Amino acid sequence: GESVGLHLPTLSVQEGDNSIINCAYSNSASDYFIWYKQESGKGPQFIIDIRSNMDKRQGQRVTVLLNKTVKHLSLQIAATQPGDSAVYFCAESSNTGNQFYFGTGTSLTVIP
Amino acid sequence: NAGVTQTPKFRILKIGQSMTLQCTQDMNHNYMYWYRQDPGMGLKLIYYSVGAGITDKGEVPNGYNVSRSTTEDFPLRLELAAPSQTSVYFCASSFELSYEQYFGPGTRLTVT
């Protein structure tokens, strides 16, 4: 099966600082990657995605970087806010896109 | 739009009992998915459907069954509940292979 893992299970940052959450994947054929945010007791919420033909994609306060050489994905959150406290998952899919494989998640805590 | 709705929110089953987890989406999405999430873990795909009348197995289908008679509904059936099926179950949908998946709030199932 696929292997998607995260480098750090927990991350604490001060409010206003930037956050970086990392993710490693093992399947060279993966061509699509997603970051999800999951707040306690809720379902995952889509944050941002990136395809394998891109190295960087930006959204509102978030940036995803993809390094295919070392099979590494990161999510950067600018000016982290208390509302950003959640578990963040990366997920990757094969060419068909029908199946996603999720990492275990990183718990982000924002300290006011 | 209500998005993706799931019922029930919580359920306790005895070993060997059966039940159906309901999932409905009102976004006219073609693709629907069932995931399970064990404590401290990522999501694992159980079954998915690319349209009414079409279903396929995901990563962990054993012990489950699904049907897709309409675009809106994608129920998940547990025939003989086992303690290993204690988990939180999430239903998700997406319009097409554009991949952005919308998740329901989840069903927390305990089998004792």
Image: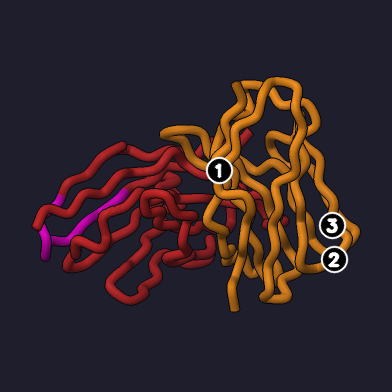
On residue B68, the disc is 3
Q: Amino acid at mark 3?
A: Arg
Q: Determine whether, in the image, residue B74 is placed left or right of residue B70.
A: left
Crowding near pointer 3: few (<14 within 10 Å), some, many (20+)?
Answer: some
Colour used to depict chain A in the structure image: red
The stretch of residues the image draws in magenta is: A13-21
The structure residue drawn at horizontal position 76% and vertical position 56%, both measured from the top left corner, is B74
Q: In the picture provided, is A82 more to the left or to the right than A60?
A: left
What mark, if any, has residue B10 been given in the picture? 1
Q: Spatial distance from mark 3 to mark 2, Cα to Cα?
A: 6 Å
Vertical comparison of A94 with A65: above or below: above
Residues tagged 3 and 2 counted as in contact (Cβ below 8 A): yes
In front: A81, or B88?
Answer: B88
Circle 2: element type: loop
Chain identity of mark 3: B
Amino acid type, mark 2: Thr
| Displayed quadrant of residue B68 | bottom right
The amino acid type found where label 1 is placed reads Phe
Q: Which residue is mark 2?
A: B70
Crowdedness near tag 2: few (<14), some (14–19) or many (≥20) residues, C-alpha within 10 Å: few
Q: Is residue A28 visible?
A: no
A17 within the magenta span: yes
